[in-house]
Amino acid sequence: MNPSEKGVVTPVRPEPIKAVPVRHPGRWAGAIIILVLAAMLVHALIFNPAFQWDVVRQTMQDDTIIHGIGVTLELTVLSMLMGVVGGVILAVMRLSPNPLLSGTAWFYIWIFRGTPVLVQLVFWNFLGAIWENLSIGIPFGPEFWSESTNKLIPTFTAALLGLGLNEAAYMAEIVRGGIQSVDEGQTEAAHALGMSRTATLRRIVLPQAMRVIVPPTGNETISMLKTTSLVQVISLSELFTAGHDIYSRTYQTIPVLVAISIYYLLMTSILTVGQYYIERYYARGANRTLPPTPFQRLRSLFAGRPAPKTGHDVVPGLEGGGHV
Amino acid sequence: MTDLTKTPRDAASAEPMVKAEGVHKSYGLVEVLKGIDLEVRQSEVFCLVGPSGSGKSTFLRCINHLEKINGGRLWVDGELVGYRQKGDRLHELKDREVALKRRDIGMVFQRFNLFPHMTAVENVMEAPVQVKRENKAAARERSMALLERVGLADKAGNYPSQLSGGQQQRVAIARALAMKPKLMLFDEPTSALDPELVGEVLDVMRGLAEEGMTMIVVTHEMGFAREVGDALVFMDGGVVVESGNPREVLTNPQHARTRAFLSKVL
Ligand SMILES: Nc1ncnc2c1ncn2[C@@H]1O[C@H](COP(=O)(O)OP(=O)(O)OP(=O)(O)O)[C@@H](O)[C@H]1O
Ligand SMILES: [Mg+2]
């Protein structure tokens, strides 16, 4: 021992507490009831002939269904991209001191949020019936370039415009809420440092707003995944339309719907996991420690209590896997 | 840091660092500043005291144009704040020009206002990199030196939520210093701190004063004002009631209002 430490009373670290944890008999009873009910449900699902599980399996391997998944994913990703980018632009416009910008954004949101998506989809699809050609030129003057509307906006583009532009209006309100949730002191501090309005927004406000923006955006994405089925009205063959085409031919409605539901569920599950990690990323600094990843939770669940770390610096609650 | 050391602060430098002439500020119909006249000389520690709501924060925020003044004139280092004079007309400055002037004025807030999503060192290097386009590695090195100076080199990687109030405020001071300001504004920098943490922040400020930084300090720490302050102004109801040497004003106030206020805080 270091001689200089002599005489200093080193506090003896007390034995860790070994107490009998609180029992939860109610929890156990509840768990058993739920398990029994779940078993009954699974039984009812598997052995009811109406579900025709072999048809379900067959449908899941059907080429048009697989192709439909691709279209659904593409539509979801692209229209959410339009939604998020458009939403940020609209939100910033809406909060701008310039009345022209905020008024324009307000009007956009009013129109696109106030009318059914279905109508918007049909509108974009039949734009060619309203204006046969779209052109670029001097307003009310000569045209330099012109193209047939139907050629310019094929069905997929119409679907994208319908879904994406509508989504932008919703995302604008979500982003605006996020921006407004950030303490004004943050903007003030950034301005006092000489940062411009744009730099303040990009570096200081938006990253903090993300904590508020991400959860509802995840919601919107999952919702969008299913809303894409509306493009059936303009006969674009995504997952739902592909299924619809099959059962209107074979009349095996239930198994086909089960098959595509399984796919929808699979895709939303993946999105949920993705959302979890994005939320975790933007929690930086807001919590003293990051919440554990699902993987870490799982590990600590099977390993029992996390192994105590050596050293004195283990603060309770700072350990990731502690709370399951 | 070398540029902070100036000649000792007796230098009756020609140009005052801040000059206010009849500064008025109202919010709607409420007049908060009713004609402020004062002068802050180079390298001076200028203390601003007064009861709550007297307009101290508002005046401080006018100096770096976070608030627009409605009347009077305000100069920082010889230049009008927020306006350009052409002939006998005033022209508002563009956002970009205002931002350019704010670089030279550091501000420290009562509630720290650190950026919570950035670590201590990232907070300090943010403005040099974003505003002055400094090289990242160089800015980080300089920021580390500044953190060292406020005694927080070992906390560079911590997020604000992982720091005590006193540590957060010291990071905030380092962040303001990173822009190499010629003037520092402190708005009640120790009011949100537990009593035992006040000292560590005042020590940093004392060090700055010794190096010759011009500082305007809104504070209720009369001990600090007496010891470090070169000038003191007592404000109440949007006007300057009394001003002078801190030791004189604090021990022998001339106005009844000053006396009433001091009897409450001393
Ligand atoms: N944005 C605002 N809108 C309307 N009134 C305001 C605004 N900001 C400040 N005020 C008012 O201006 C007056 C002066 O406020 P200020 O914050 O400058 O006081 P202060 O002297 O700093 O007080 P404190 O010691 O409590 O910080 C107060 O009456 C306050 O209510
Ligand atoms: Mg104040």
Image (cartoon, rainbow, N blue to C red):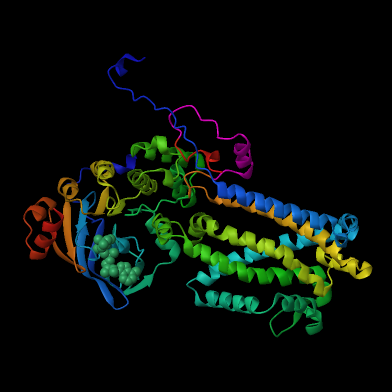
> In the rendering, at what x and y percent does residue A185 appear?
40, 59
Residue at screen point 61% across, 52% down: A30
Q: Position of residue A97 (x, y in %)?
A: 47, 72
Q: Quadrant of the N terminus of chain B?
A: top left
Question: Looking at the rendering, which quadrant does residue A4 occupy?
Answer: top left
Q: Report x, y in % for residue A264.
A: 76, 59
Give the residue drawn at x 31%, y 18%. Answer: A5
Using residue A33 as the reference point, say whether residue B32 is left or right of it: left
Q: Is residue A119 magenta?
A: no
Which quadrant contains ligand 2? bottom left
Along the line of sight, which residue is nearer the eye, B179 or A281? A281
Q: Is residue A162 above or below residue A59?
A: below
Is A32 on the left-hand or right-hand side of B108?
right
Q: Main secondary structure of the magenta part?
A: loop
Number of marks in the rendered image: 0
| Residue A81 makes an appearance in the image | no
Q: Is residue A305 magenta?
A: yes
**Residue drawn 54% across and 78% down?**
A103
Do we see residue B249 in this rendering?
Answer: yes
Residues in magenta, as a range: A291-314
* Image-quadrant location for residue B211: top left
Q: Is residue A28 left or right of residue A38?
A: left
In the foreground, A317 or B17: A317
Q: Residue furthest right?
A: A250
Q: Is residue B98 above or below residue A319?
A: below
Q: What percent of the width, then of the height, locates residue A178? A: 52, 62
